Image (tube, grey):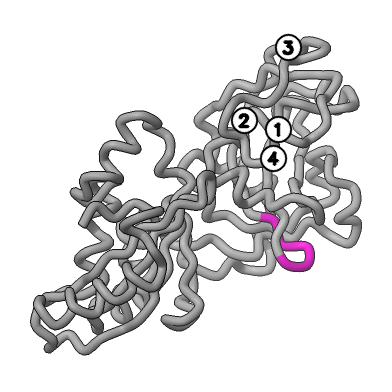
Amino acid sequence: MNATATLDLAGILSLYDSSILQARVKLARHADPKYDIRLIVESGFLPEFEARQNRPVFDDCDYVLSFLGEQGARSRFLRCTRVEGVAENPSPYPQGFPYPEMEPCRYRYDLRAVEVLRDLEGRLVIDWGASTRSWVQWLNPDKPKAVVEIRVPGRGIDFPGYDDVFLSFSQLAEIIEHPEANPSWHSALSAVAGIYLILDEGSGNQYVGAAWGEEGLLGRWKSYAATLHGGNKLLRAMLDRDPEGYRRFRFSILRTLPRTMTPTQVQEIEGLYKKMLGTRAFGLNGN
């Protein structure tokens, strides 16, 4: 839903837990021109990323409200944490972190997730204000952060057109789990059969798949959201070796087809794409 002009972040907090307004609370807006912070968030590494800092930015506060920087000054709420402590000279980023080349940081904070605003994670968007370069600011009720939007559950990603689909696994799962927030996706994907591609961004391996039947692409992609591997033998084996590997999957559409086509017709076209991309010999297709 769209927020009214009088709604602000401190007002939202007062409705959920007014005691936090008596504590020392900082707001952290994560945005970096060199790195895709959204990828870090969607890969599950926000806690590791946010904990490591080159300056003692969280030494003087009790709580941190974290936000993802979006277009302009828009800032999407990610989580609320309590500052439990800090250590110096932390170990390198853990295996699987999207940007292992990031410089080592001096401090590593112990940030414990709390329940405050938990149901608004990913849904609450505020206006950070004019100074987006000040990525850490104090929560100050006298300098309100206007609420721009509170979305219905789910991320509500806009459907970009079949040719421009490039979804992370977490985005796909959100779309499948929350049809009310993503009606254009459900309508578009269920309207067509098609040939799709799953890319493992870590290894570069590719899997070509096909979808047909009453729910078309939507029905096939639902199986990945439910099982992670969609029943595919090589994908299942890969995830047995690397259970977190699904976080690196990216879904795209190679070709849409009429839903009236028979499974045999769709599979013939699927086989052509497997040949063109070499996914039997060098990818994740076992047949």
Q: Amino acid at mark 4?
A: Tyr
Look at mark 1 in the image and give the residue it sits on.
Answer: 50
Look at mark 2 in the image and give the residue it sits on.
Answer: 47
Tell which circle, 3 or 2, labels the residue nearer the N-terminal end: 2
Q: Is residue 60 visible?
A: no
Question: Residue 16, relative to residue 73: is it above or below?
Answer: above
Q: Is residue 66 visible?
A: yes
Q: Please give the range of residues in magenta.
A: 71-75
Task: For mark 3, give the secondary structure.
Answer: strand
Farthest residue to the front: give it.
281
Q: Amino acid at mark 3?
A: Gly
Tell which circle, 2 or 4, labels the residue nearer the N-terminal end: 2
Q: Is residue 5 left or right of residue 2?
A: right
Numbered circles on residues, count = 4
Mark 4 is surrounded, within 10 Å at the Cα level, by few (under 14), some (14 to 19) or many (20 or more) other residues, namely some
Question: Residue 280, relative to residue 139: is it above or below?
Answer: below
Question: Residue 161, relative to residue 89: is it above or below?
Answer: below
Look at mark 3 in the image and give the residue it sits on.
Answer: 85
Residue 193: x and y in percent read: 23, 79
Kindly indicate whether the residue at mark 2 contacts the one at mark 1 (C-beta within 8 angstroms).
Answer: yes
Residue 216: x and y in percent read: 20, 75
Kindly indicate whether the residue at mark 4 contacts the one at mark 2 (C-beta within 8 angstroms).
Answer: no
Task: For mark 1, give the secondary structure.
Answer: helix
In magenta segment, residue 105: no
Q: Amino acid at mark 1?
A: Glu
Q: Residue at x 27, y 47 (%)?
A: 229
Q: CA distance from mark 4 to mark 3?
A: 25 Å
